[in-house]
Image: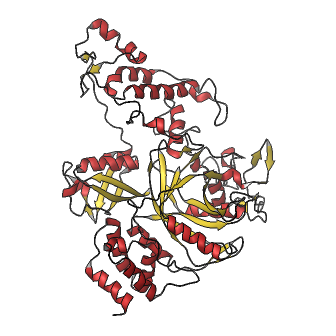
Amino acid sequence: MSEIIVMLKSEMGLNRLSILSNQTFSEFVNKVAQVLNKPPESLSLILEGVSLTQKISPTLPIKNIPKFQDGAMINVTVDQKKVQIKPQQIQTPEQPKVYLANGKLANFQQLQQVDHKIHENKDHALSQFCQHGPQAKCINCLSQSSSKIEKEEKPEVNKCKHGEGGRCLNCAPYEQEKKNTKTVNKILCQHGPNGKCPHCIDEGQIEAKHLSFDQYLHDMKFKCRGQHPDNGRCNNCLPPTMISYKVKKDCKNHAPYPKAMCNNCLPPSILLKRQAYRHVDYVEFLNIPEMSNLVQYWTSKGKTEQRMGFLYGYYAADPNYQNGVRAIVEAIYEPPQKGSFGHVDLQQDPAQNYADEIATNLGMEKIGWIFTNVNHDCFLSSEELRQAAKYQQAHSVKHPEGCLVSKFLTVVLRTKKDNPDEVVPEVYMVSDQGQQLEYDGIFKNSERRKVLQVRDAKDEFDMLPSFVYNGKSVKEFEPDFFIVNVAHGYNPNSNYSILKLYDFPVENRTVVAKQQDLKTFLHKHQKKPSHYRFADFHLLLYLSKLIDIHSIANIAQFIASECEITQDLLDIVKMYATGV
């Protein structure tokens, strides 16, 4: 029984998914639906032009599906009409049989005490829907009490007047139910005190400064439960990324702006505060040798010429956070650039498309940018924050809620203030508010690193939002209000990484890779399997310029699926390496 790892390509971007080879196609579809947060019946899976949804039987094992192997790229399309259809409710009998924990049929008096016993956590009862023995428990055991909780009215939940992070009597039912849910789930555990199971996994989750974005939306929707239809929207559950800070010029209540205007057309006022959520909860660096190489090259220049590069990797679920997202970094591409003490200017790069195509065939995508820095006056300067916001906007994807979100990361390699010889990474993102403000053209260039400035109005018809801080209107402020911190760490285990090697010369540096470097590299790793021997991002970039991008894209696919590279491709590389 082996594990197969495939890539999912959808409107949300790339996702990496693993499944056992003996599992059925139906089980695979359900896992895809869980990853994309969509109903299984709304998904259409396509592998190399063949519709798996239409051709493959739901009971067919994964290992028997043609071309379904490690590294396979599966395109997923979603039928939005089927997404809106609510699942059919299960009709339960009016008088189900109920059993006690000892397996005996409950009498009338015992039946009346079932709900009370469940709430007091002293006993549990089985219904005819349970598939386990009398000593085990499942969600059907709690169906009567759960339905009772659902029917409780919470008319005051939606009347909070305080800001985020505050508490009042109206919040009490929500917080109490979250606490009760954890208590009830823990009762279902069947293991010892040191064990873990799906019922208590939340106990090991990290209490982070920022909520994951999906968890943040879940908490907002909870407060609106019962106030409007499930597919409805109100100010309390509207995704924050859907707010625009421009004048609304297509208002249907009156003639187009500037002929007429109402309160709904005005840009909203902005209360400066830090964002409560983040789109990426943790960044895992698998390319430790490559990052060390970048730092060494930067240090060799006396740290006077700053360097930057683009990060390539993929996203995965993070079990350490509720609805968490983890970004895995495996490669850095350094484009042509000219660095100074406090700035990096990018030059024209015809090979950028090659890097993107190689990454795609490796099952990766561009997930961030990285740059060096020696300044300690602020986390991100006004210029750096605005550039990060532009990158995030350019790499936005559609969220299941319908709004555009970005998971593009900003990594800073900075010297320590008390030890300039030591360099440590810092990971940030720009808040959705800061990203949208930059996209709407609200900021202007600032000569001060620690100050963001609002531009002046172009004319009398140019309406700008007002910024409020400590009850006062301001025109300039610190960039820190729009910075979101992201946790990060290293993983020295390369068993699960796509790229295995990082010792081929890096492109666009002072020393340019030559034919002898290729020959030396291949000779050094000649005893390793071919898919391992070529698993170096910079080697593939060099070969794409030396041979052609299509041949190297094929090699990248063999690397991603951990299959031996065909002999004809190996012969072509050998010819260029030896000149024979």
Taking depth in this image into account, of 54 and 258 the one nearest to the observer is: 54
16 lies left or right of 48 = right
Marker count (numbered): 0
Residue, x 51% and y 77% (percent of image)?
506
Q: Position of residue 151 (x, y in %)?
A: 44, 22
Q: Is residue 39 above or below residue 96?
A: below
Residue drawn at (39%, 33%) of the image: 199
Where is 57 relative to 230, above or below? below
Q: Is residue 451 left or right of residue 55?
A: right
Locate residue 130: give its quadrant: top left
Q: Is residue 22 left or right of residue 82?
A: left
Residue 435: % across, % down: 62, 56
Decide which of 514, 29 is in the foreground and name it: 514
Q: Quadrant of residue 519?
A: bottom left
Residue placed most toward the observer, 88 or 164:
164
Could one spot residue 244 in this view of the protein?
A: no
In the image: residue 390, left or right of residue 381: left
**Residue at position x 59%, y 83% from top?**
510
Question: How is the protein colored in the picture?
Answer: secondary structure
Task: Determine if residue 415 is in view.
Answer: yes
Of 167 and 158, nearer the camera is 167
Residue 570's x, y, as percent?
Answer: 31, 81
Name which residue lies at 76% across and 60% down: 455
From the top left corner, tell me how far across and down residue 136 is, in percent.
Answer: 29, 25
Check the image and name the residue furthest to the top.
Answer: 109
Quadrant (top left, top right, bottom left, bottom right) of the C terminus: bottom left
